[in-house]
Image (cartoon, rainbow, N blue to C red):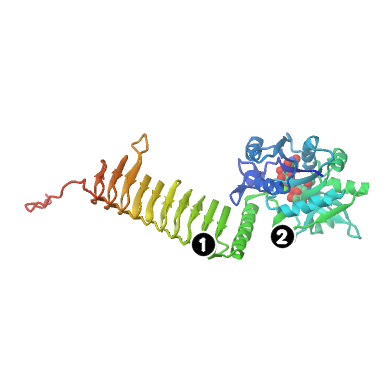
Amino acid sequence: MSLEVIILAAGKGTRMRSDMPKVLHTLAGKPMLVHAVEQAQKLAPTRTHIIVGHGADQVEAQVKPLGAQCVPQEQQLGTGHAVAQAMPNVDSEATVLVLYGDVPLVPAALMQQLADQAMQGGLAILTVALDDSTGYGRIVRNDQGEIQAIVEHKDATPEQRQIKEINTGILAAKASLLNGWLPRIESDNAQGEIYLTDIVAMAVADGVPISHLQPEFAQQTQGVNDRVQLAELERWHQLQLANQLLRDGVQLADPSRFDLRGELTTGKDIFIDINAIIEGQVVLEDGVHIGPNCHLKDAHIGAGTHVFANSVIDQARVAKHCNIGPFARLRPGTVLEDGAKVGNFVETKKTTLGKGSKANHFTYLGDTVVGEKVNIGAGTITCNYDGVNKFQTNIEDGAFIGSNSSIVAPVTIGAGATVGAGSTITKDVADNNLAIARGKQRNLASWAKPVKS
Ligand code: UD1
Ligand code: CA
């Protein structure tokens, strides 16, 4: 039997105090709505419908590439009205799973359980008991413990407000049942809205069985209304990710000072010091050591490599047993081959550093191919840009670049060549030659210091 998913995402999210639609605010570097869509897609639904209103164009741009279809809800008349907008596009034989775009951490397995229950023919709802249930729809049960209704906070009696079990908003039912219930919902309530939750009392009246499920952790069904809640959920989620890495054998100096905003693939015996930010797709091979305050994005770090404190690595490939930093910046297109060293205040861009080559201090290498066992002296700059175009520098195997040299591209420094310190190199240097291009030193013995007039 087919499954279709409807995700409510039309609300403005006033309390975020933002120009961006609430569901596009990010958790672990990804829009909340994208979290929900990605988990839902693990259930392989035939269609995913996103109900959009505020910032519809922005929301659509995010979810279209994921294969979801957007359904406009011009006016936000309530959650029941929102679901009704999608129903004309839903196969009447399908089972429907309703999710919220501002509830990002519902696990796919829990969604699947709820959908499976609904496929038996009843209404399946996800509830959770909270110490403070203020503001939520309360689950009203009879003396037998059977669910009778959901009563919204604003409509609840003082006794009902004591109820700790709340409606997470997430539910599943066959489309045929929803098609029967939705048109009958009225808006005679405290908020004048078309409440989706009214279908619970309708199910009771129709004798349709109601089943319920609870999440393992309340955070998995926590919705986000403001930035405080978003920050709290981020910290909880990051701690889950950090604990999973610890269980996988990665040592984190402090799991509460670690941020993963993407996917991290790890080998064995990796150590990550405090305040690491890992973004995009990052691979750390066996024995990698990441020092404090490092930012790694879309990077592959080979076995035994040491990244020292305060280094930034973005779209770079680093081979085995390299040393990077402290205070190094590897920009996109950097490749370090085995045993290469990039030290403090060194910036590289579209640059390959061959096996065992070193640029240990205060250097910029851009659009450069450095061979093996090359030594780049402190303060070396490749001048790759003439203000209009970028040019390539080649520094061949075993070359030695003296400190404070400017290498003006396009230029090639041959294998085994030496560049004298302080040179401005504008012409190719042949293999094994010494190039010196600097003002000659003169010492004037007759020099008299000026005196104050
Ligand atoms: C809703 C539930 C409440 C539950 C709570 C859980 C109803 C009537 N109430 O209340 O029982 O405890 O969620 O967080 O369902 N939305 C639309 N279109 C609309 C209205 C809402 O897309 O016309 C979207 C919102 O953007 C949001 C979600 O639906 O993502 C929930 O709407 P919201 O107004 O926040 O519902 P609550 O009052 O929190
Ligand atoms: Ca809400």
What residue is drawn where x is 71% and y is 60%?
Answer: 217
In the figure, is residue 11 to the left or right of 450?
A: right
Depth check: give the residue in front, 133 or 55.
55
Depth check: give the residue in front, 448 or 236.
236
Q: Are marks 1 and 2 in contact (CB under 8 Å)?
A: no
Near mark 2 (Cα within 10 A), the count class, few <14, some 14-19 or many ≥20, is few
Upstream in sequence: badge 1 or badge 2 = 2
Q: Position of residue 249 (x, y in %)?
A: 58, 65
Q: Secondary structure at mark 1?
A: loop
Quadrant of the rendered image containing residue 368: top left
Q: Position of residue 98 (x, y in %)?
A: 77, 45
Q: Which residue is mark 2?
A: 217
Q: Quadrant of the N terminus?
A: top right
Q: Which residue is mark 1?
A: 286
Amino acid on which the number 2 mark rests in the picture: Phe
Q: Secondary structure at mark 2?
A: loop
Q: Is mark 2 within 8 Å of ligand 1?
A: no
In the figure, is residue 410 to the left or right of 280?
A: left
Near mark 1 (Cα within 10 A), the count class, few <14, some 14-19 or many ≥20, is some
Q: Residue furthest left?
A: 446
What residue is drawn where x is 75% and y is 41%?
Answer: 46
Q: Is residue 59 visible?
A: yes
What residue is drawn where x is 93% and y is 46%?
Answer: 206
Q: Position of residue 314 (x, y in %)?
A: 48, 49
What residue is drawn where x is 51% and y is 51%?
Answer: 297
Q: Is mark 1 within 8 Å of ligand 1?
A: no
